Image: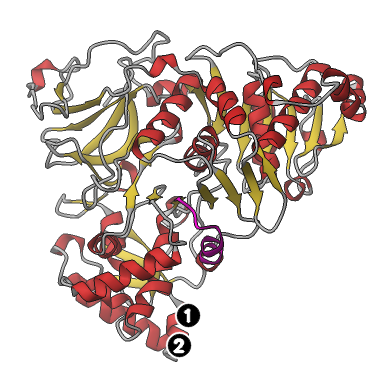
């Protein structure tokens, strides 16, 4: 479909689609001739969720300010086995950073970059920037130095807050427009190109003492005048698969809409614990863990080590979190390695392939699962990649409180999510509040088509990249997600895979590799897989579960033979056009993005 030029005006045009509204469940069909572009012959199903009519009465900075005051003596952030900050400590640090900004002539609207591992001080730098109404530019600490340099320069950042481990690999000469670089670990000034900044940092405690001569109290917390809804709040650079990443411009409207939606669908009480396992430089963890949690008085714990299943389980036993946000890989490994073997060590992950599991096993599995997740878990939110179908069936069968969230950085991030009690198997839920969904398909309930969306969460565009914006958002404000999906008559969305990943069989059948990989990953001795097309045949690249193969004393030949036997059994369940003809074992894990999705483009043109 040809994309039309994106317009700067508000996206309030009437959609050329039928609407399904949850209150009525009624679909209004349209004919292909009703579509503006007559060359695109399809019907559209459009789903709208217009909750939160009082939305515009709230302001994000006001919510942050009120949360600090109301939770003054509660703990806000803890670096696991490290320093803890109370809300009043956060407020004090914010006040000092604001003084530093003022002295260095940093103004509202200026860009401030932030790159480092999750920590309490990372969050302080973020909050200080956004409450000053400067524009925060969080950068994934996993980005290569060249990409970090590019983002700092492209965003026109005036300051850079940087983690000490990231700073070791950066070159300040490659970022010539910065006024200064501040180490986020202790807020020391490591590079200064401004006398005002140097003087302010050296005399910051004195400046703070003069302004708050007696004692810093909650009534001193009062931030800049309220933001406007469509004012730029932060630029989040996507973890692009090729070349340099694009800067997604997100407004206060988008962030606030996401936060209020999390409050309605998940809910938190002041003092609830959250274990943050996702990088805050990515918008999934940034919203679901950090901003949502802080706005409602939660206590966030940041892991100081790689968030492996073992580390997460150890952490959860001590912290007893109320909610946990994570990628599917973490949940899958926890259940496969820690829960299923404890239920029945002889069955292992074969339990996932048994259609009917006894009630007794289910009860034991749920009990063990809740215990391993700390015993206080309200909901585990899974997102960022497809959830293994067999694993989801098992987790669902024992009534474990999980939900699937779907979104994109471009929507800050939420597009779909339903509370776990309402969600359906293999669905990522319904449209988020204030979002409208549309599937471009002749039969949106049965035939997959590209999922498009628009509404309150939508980005302002890509920073200094009008061409990319025009390619992604059409003239009616619809964001083209690049994901294939169907939407049922109740508004539940079912993702089928990426448009660009879809494979075409020799007979013209559409093949969604993610669906096959979900089944492959559940076979004995398979850790993860990737399905590609080679010479018009489907080939599976498999990274084995070496722990299991070593435990069963399988050499390389035996491992290949066992996986090939499993391939033949799996093919009996698949239609002829989507059967795997060959398995190639990979000795190393697949390269992944920050969301832990495999970088497919690296493997699709392999010479086999």
Instruction: Using residue 279 as the reference point, say whether residue 395 is left or right of it.
Output: left
Instruction: Using residue 372 as the reference point, say whether residue 125 is left or right of it.
Output: right
**In the depicted structure, whether residue 85 falls above or below residue 359:** above
User: For this rendering, which residue is in front, 517 or 264?
Assistant: 264
**In the depicted structure, whether residue 563 falls above or below residue 245:** below
**Magenta span main SS:** helix
Q: Are marks 2 and 1 in contact (CB under 8 Å)?
A: yes
Find the magenta span and give its range. 312-322
Q: Secondary structure at mark 2?
A: helix
Residue 165 rendering spot, x and y as whole percentages: 74, 50
Instruction: Using residue 300 as the reference point, say whether residue 106 is left or right of it.
Output: right
| Label 1 environment density (alpha carbons within 10 Å; few <14, some 14–19, many ≥20) | few
Residue where numbered disc 1 is placed: 547
Residue where numbered disc 2 is placed: 551
User: Is residue 315 located in the magenta-colored stretch of the structure?
Assistant: yes
Residue with the most extreme top position: 9
Numbered tag placed on residue 217 in the rendering: none
User: For this rendering, which residue is in front, 363 or 571?
Assistant: 363
Residue, x 47% and y 21% (percent of image)? 461
Residue 555 rendering spot, x and y as whole percentages: 45, 89
User: Is residue 44 located in the magenta-colored stretch of the structure?
Assistant: no
Residue with the most extreme bottom position: 553
Residue 582 rendering spot, x and y as whole percentages: 30, 71
User: For this rendering, which residue is in front, 79 or 285?
Assistant: 79
Residue 217 rendering spot, x and y as whole percentages: 73, 26
Residue, x 43% and y 10% (percent of image)? 8
Q: From the image, which quarter does the C terminus lie in?
A: bottom left
Residue, x 35% and y 43% (percent of image)? 405
């Amino acid at each position: 479909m040809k994309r039309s030029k994106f317009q700067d005006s508000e996206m309030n045009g009437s959609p050329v689609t039928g609407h399904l509204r949850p209150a009525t469940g009624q679909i209004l069909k349209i004919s292909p001739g009703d579509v503006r572009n007559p060359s695109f012959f399809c019907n559209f199903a459009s789903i709208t969720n217009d909750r939160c009519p009082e939305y515009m009465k709230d302001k994000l900075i006001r919510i942050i300010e009120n949360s600090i005051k109301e939770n003054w003596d509660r703990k806000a952030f803890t670096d696991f086995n490290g320093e803890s900050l109370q809300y009043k400590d956060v407020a004090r640090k914010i006040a000092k950073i604001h003084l530093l900004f003022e002295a260095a002539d940093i103004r509202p609207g200026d860009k401030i970059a932030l790159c480092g591992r999750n920590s309490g001080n990372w969050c302080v730098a973020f909050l200080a920037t956004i409450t000053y109404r400067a524009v925060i530019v969080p950068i994934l600490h996993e980005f290569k130095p060249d990409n970090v340099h590019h983002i700092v320069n492209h965003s026109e950042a005036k300051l850079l807050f940087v983690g000490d481990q990231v700073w070791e690999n950066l070159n300040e000469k490659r970022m010539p427009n910065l006024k200064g670089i501040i180490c986020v670990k202790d807020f020391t000034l490591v590079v200064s190109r401004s006398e005002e900044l140097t003087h302010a940092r050296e005399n910051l405690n004195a400046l703070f003492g003069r302004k708050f001569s007696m004692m810093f109290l909650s009534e001193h917390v009062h931030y800049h005048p309220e933001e406007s809804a469509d004012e730029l709040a932060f630029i989040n650079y996507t973890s692009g698969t090729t070349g340099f990443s694009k800067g997604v411009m997100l407004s206060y409207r988008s962030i606030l809409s996401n936060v209020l939606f999390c409050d309605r669908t998940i809910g938190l009480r002041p003092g609830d614990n959250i274990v943050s396992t996702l990088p805050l430089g990515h918008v999934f963890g940034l919203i679901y863990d950090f901003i949502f949690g802080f706005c409602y008085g939660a206590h966030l714990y940041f892991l100081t080590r790689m968030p492996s299943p073992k580390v997460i389980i150890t952490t959860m036993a001590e912290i007893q979190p109320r909610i946990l946000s994570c990628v599917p890989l973490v949940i899958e490994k926890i259940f496969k390695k820690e829960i299923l073997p404890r239920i029945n060590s002889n069955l292992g992950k074969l339990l996932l392939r048994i259609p009917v599991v006894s009630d007794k096993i289910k009860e034991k599995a749920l009990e063990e699962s809740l215990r391993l997740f700390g015993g206080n878990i309200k909901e585990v939110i899974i997102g960022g990649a497809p959830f293994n179908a067999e694993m989801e069936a098992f987790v669902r069968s024992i009534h474990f409180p999980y939900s699937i969230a779907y979104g994109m950085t471009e929507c800050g991030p939420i597009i779909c999510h339903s509370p776990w009690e309402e969600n359906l198997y293999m669905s990522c839920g319904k449209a988020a509040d204030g979002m409208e969904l549309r599937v471009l398909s002749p039969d949106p309930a049965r035939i997959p088509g590209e999922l498009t969306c628009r509404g309150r969460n939508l980005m302002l565009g890509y920073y200094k990249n009008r061409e990319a914006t025009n390619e992604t958002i059409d003239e009616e404000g619809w964001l083209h997600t690049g994901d294939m999906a169907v939407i049922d008559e109740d508004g539940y969305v079912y993702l089928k895979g990426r448009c660009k990943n879809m494979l075409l069989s020799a007979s013209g059948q559409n093949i969604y590799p993610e669906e096959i990989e979900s089944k492959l990953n559940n076979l004995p001795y398979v850790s993860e897989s990737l399905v590609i097309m080679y010479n018009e045949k489907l080939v599976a690249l498999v990274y084995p579960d070496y722990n299991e193969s070593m435990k069963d004393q399988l050499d390389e030949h035996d491992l290949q033979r066992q996986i090939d036997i499993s391939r033949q059994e799996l093919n009996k369940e698949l239609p002829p056009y989507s059967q795997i003809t060959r398995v190639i074992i990979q000795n190393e894990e697949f390269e992944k993005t920050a969301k832990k999705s495999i970088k497919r483009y690296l493997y699709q043109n392999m010479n086999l």
